[in-house]
Amino acid sequence: MPTTAKSLLEAANAAVPKISGKEAREMVANGAVIVDVRDSAEVAQTGKAKGAFHIPRGSLEFKADQTAASAEKALATDKPVILHCASGGRAALAGKLLKDMGYEQVYNLGGFKDWVEAGGEVEK
């Protein structure tokens, strides 16, 4: 039976813990990296969490591979990484990808609105 989007999302949600906006803010204050996996147009429209790295989901593999020349040096397999998108689905799938790539501490914040509603700062 072919894999469905629903089954991929279920597996991702099972592998990547969901955290609240408050928890995300506390973790970022303690050194966690926050990554916005939305498309560039979405980020341009709303801004992003202050200090977040914008890495669209389609580029994540290339930025997360620390052996690649294109690697984002702020990412490390032993450092907490918090992901978010618009509502949480892409963040869950991205989190599962990072886990598959050896990242140990990966969390799904959910949507950008979860950051904002928890009082997280936004930069345009």
Image (tube, rainbow, N blue to C red):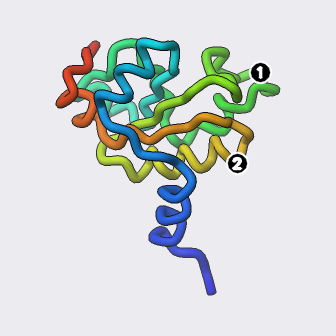
Mark 2 falls on what kind of element? helix
- Residue 69, horizontal then vertical, whole percent: 77, 21
Q: Describe residue 115's horizontal placement relative to residue 76 as left or right.
A: left
CA neighbours of label 2 inside 10 A, class few (<14), some (14 to 19), many (20+): few
- Residue 95, horizontal then vertical, whole percent: 55, 44
Identity, as a three-letter code, of the amino acid under mark 1: Ala
CA neighbours of label 1 inside 10 A, class few (<14), some (14 to 19), many (20+): few
Judged by depth in the image, the label closer to the viewer, 2 or 1, is: 2
What residue lies at 76% left-to-right and 25% top-to-bottom? Answer: 66
Quadrant of residue 54 in the image?
top left
What residue lies at 30% left-to-right and 40% top-to-bottom? Answer: 111
Q: Describe residue 118's horizontal placement relative to residue 29 as left or right.
A: left
Residue that lies at the very extreme toward the bottom in this rendered image: 1
**Residue 100 circle label:** 2
Quadrant of residue 8 in the image?
bottom right
What residue lies at 26% left-to-right and 20% top-to-bottom? Answer: 120
- Residue 87, horizontal then vertical, whole percent: 30, 47
What residue lies at 73% left-to-right and 39% top-to-bottom? Answer: 102
Residue corresponding to mark 1? 69
Q: Taking 40 as reference, is 19 above or below it?
A: below
